[in-house]
Amino acid sequence: MNGFDLTINNLLETAARDNGDQKIVYMGKSVTYNEFYKNALNLSRNLIRIGVRKNDVVAVIDYDSLMYMYAYYSIPMIGSILHTVNIRYPPEIIFYTMQRADDSYIMIDESFMGLIVKNRDYLNFIKGIIVNSAGHRHFDVNIPVYYFDDLLKDSDAKFEEPDENDTATLFFTSGTTGLPKGVSFTHRQLVLHSIASIAALSNEPIKYNINDVIMPLVPMFHVHAWGIPYTSIMNGLKYVLPGKYDVPRILETMATERISMSAMVPTILYMLLSDKNAKQAFQNLNLKVIIGGAALSRGLAERARAYGIDVVSGYGMSETAPILTLGVYNRKVINKSDEEKFEFRLKTGIPIPMVSLRVVNNNRDVENNGKEIGEIIVRAPWLTKGYIKDEEKTRELWKDGWLHTGDLAVVDEYGYVKIVDREKDAIKSGGEFIPSLILEDLISTISGVNEVAVVAKSDDKWGERPVAFINGNLSVEELKLKMMEFVDTGRIAKFWIPDDFIFVNEMPKTSTGKIDKKVLREKLR
Amino acid sequence: MNGFDLTINNLLETAARDNGDQKIVYMGKSVTYNEFYKNALNLSRNLIRIGVRKNDVVAVIDYDSLMYMYAYYSIPMIGSILHTVNIRYPPEIIFYTMQRADDSYIMIDESFMGLIVKNRDYLNFIKGIIVNSAGHRHFDVNIPVYYFDDLLKDSDAKFEEPDENDTATLFFTSGTTGLPKGVSFTHRQLVLHSIASIAALSNEPIKYNINDVIMPLVPMFHVHAWGIPYTSIMNGLKYVLPGKYDVPRILETMATERISMSAMVPTILYMLLSDKNAKQAFQNLNLKVIIGGAALSRGLAERARAYGIDVVSGYGMSETAPILTLGVYNRKVINKSDEEKFEFRLKTGIPIPMVSLRVVNNNRDVENNGKEIGEIIVRAPWLTKGYIKDEEKTRELWKDGWLHTGDLAVVDEYGYVKIVDREKDAIKSGGEFIPSLILEDLISTISGVNEVAVVAKSDDKWGERPVAFINGNLSVEELKLKMMEFVDTGRIAKFWIPDDFIFVNEMPKTSTGKIDKKVLREKLR
């Protein structure tokens, strides 16, 4: 009766009403929330008009564009499902995920149409393609083609608003092991994830607020850009879309748009900081950055700090929408010195509101001593119900009513969680875990090391032994000397020292920019 | 499947897990969240054991005590309904609301038992009384009596967890017109109201965060203390319960517990500031106060500022759980000078997340020009479905899918709403509205005025004319001189000047501490 379900529709309507003249910026041009809402409604109506129906899955293939932003809203608003296609997958995997998701329409930028034209014979399950092409280019496909700008025109087609428990989005995990697995989220889950994110991010040192200008650098195909396209519109922020990730242009946009907040994986931060114009771009910007997707190493965090950037770790996964924890300051650490507090930003963090998080070892919560290692298991109102068409993996994910993250962590006396390894990346030597993330974190602080990854090599005597892959400018001798210093100062155990240090010019990366340990492990076979 | 509904149960379980060693303080003693959760679970189980069932309504009669805090959780956690009884009603009205609410149990402090014993014959609908009496005093009633401390003892009684759409709380509006009307809220509504409150309060100048120490001075019988007993536990704050409102003791507690945040009606703030120890108590406290329930006058806000207190207006009503807007700074005002920004704290504010708010005049949204007056209508996920056993008033409240607040307001160019009158308090003179709240606000700034209320007197010629009731030390001549100054400087129209200024030693107050204009209007008849 009160007519306010937790839907994307109500989220956008309210945002437009409360912050109608706020702006969304793309390539130097902007639309107000009011204009965006009007256009999004027209797009919704025109999708209905061309035949898109409730529960139809619409695949979106693009960089972080304004069209993508419209897709985030217009597709779920008619009860259809937004499939954010990972454009960094090889074509074969892209089509695998599209079939598995039962996609029936594609929304795509013309720059990606080569992929479609070339593979048109595999795409017989697609009913229509919506192309963003200002020149209305012709494409040689046997599928009806519509032009995106036509679908923004006024329409009076009617649609029924979805229920809050209808599926709104789906996408596939980056899949460091095996084929990608599909996960999905409902309107309600996305709205709750957004409001809880706002509440959590408001704490120090992030102090996310209605005056921030945000440009997320988390691809919109990846875990719906950590929910930021919903979170930030709900909170009424000025939103800048980065387009294709081009480091010089991103730095320029950051400076001209006075970006105050962003979010990215460590690799992107590393690339930005390594650019020759970085210092100029970041000075006086007071930029705040949430780092997720992989551990924030001390070395990278210190480099960012030197540029005046406030970095804080976040943690989550595709299955969790994604945010579970943030490295914000709780009451136990807020009054420590800046130097001491810095440590907590590097940790995995503390649970955000409505996240019930446990670290368990043999069905028992670990001690808060920073030592005992257990698996992170969680409950929250925005976790995926399971994997698409995969009951077995769904059962593994959800055991005893808790989502099992497969991440191994410790909890310190202040309640901060720190991931020490992915269960599948863990190195077990002589029956003891060697936490690769702690090793990587320390090695990253050594002068001359740019990137590091520690993986397991099988070993006849110990079962497994660690090997470090290094991208940097220093000698193995220098590395070994430093490792012995870490042992002498009690920071690592002697048996943690990697057996080998292998230098590489470039680290293999997954489609979401994380170092691909699977490839590194294969190199050792 | 993910097992996390929006229930009070999950809110408390998560709070205890995430902030188990945080404290709730009452009368100098404290319990940790962990202890509180354990005790609350035992109270829930023992309520089941003595016969309380799902959907049974339990009336609570007490000051803001630790027992009340347990009641806020333990009663809804078994699917029963918490009825927060307004202890400032006359006994006759108390029993009216208890019957209307279908109360079947009473949870009460022994200090209120006189009321029950005296009226025991009217209470034949009550099945049991839970009394907080350390000495287990005997009471002469024909109803089974249980002692509160006994019900905190370990119990293994089982209960079924409620659904998030089950009713959790009910209470009655303060009723400035006619008999009190009952409203109710579900678990889900309370959880959503809490998370949205956290997100909104995090903005400047409140910057509510996980390090605040909060002592609300909003009675727990009144709109479930604006949701703060849920909001602040969800956010993991140190929570101090004030007990019975005793000004010297409150000031002492504020200083010793280093209270950083509170919430109250203007009258309470006025009382605190008027105490001889106020200056000493507030200095260096950096207290932040949300003012609601009635308009925050400029005079009072300036007095608070002189004591180093950051005051900000909030707005809501019993029907809305209550928070709808807050006078926090949005992007359009954040960069103004402190003096200019101060003005916005006095306004009704901007909508908090998930609140869709309109100000409408003849079914059309008013212009954002600070002049056109319309009625505030709202949608949000936490509005009462209607009035208990009153279909007609429910239909009036909910028209066309919007909750009609009955408050008249303007919206300025920055999007800030400012209430100019209650519809029922509005003064219409010669066909034009005279906004009593604006008049009161201006009069409150005149030196010598302590409290002011402007109400309508019927007038043969003009229909209605304004009359000002004043509590203060100045002459009518001084007042009239000042009013002419306001006219000369363009702040009011000449016809707004009240026809009469009537001096009173004390303002009549409603049960929630607001000035009772109904009584003042009756004086004029």
Image (tube, coloured by chain):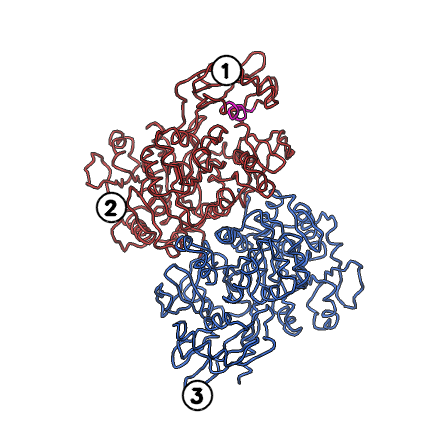
Chain colours: A blue, B red
Label 3 belongs to which residue?
A460
Label 1 belongs to which residue?
B478
Image position of A227 with respect to B66: above or below:
below
> Where does residue B147 sit, x and y in percent of width and height?
23, 43
Which chain is home to disc 2? B
Which chain is home to disc 1? B
Q: Amino acid at mark 2?
A: Asp
Range shown magenta: B435-443
> Which is more foreground, mark 1 or mark 2?
1
> Where does residue B140 sit, x and y in percent of width and height?
20, 34
Q: Residue furthest top?
A: B460
Query: In the drawing, does residue B237 fall left or right of residue A283?
Result: left
| Badge number at residue B149 | 2
| Residue in the foreground of this view, choosing between A39 and A437 | A437
Query: In the drawing, does residue B273 fall left or right of residue A21?
Result: left
Element under disc 1? helix
Q: Amino acid at mark 1?
A: Glu
Marks 3 and 2, how far apart in space?
63 Å
Element under disc 3? loop
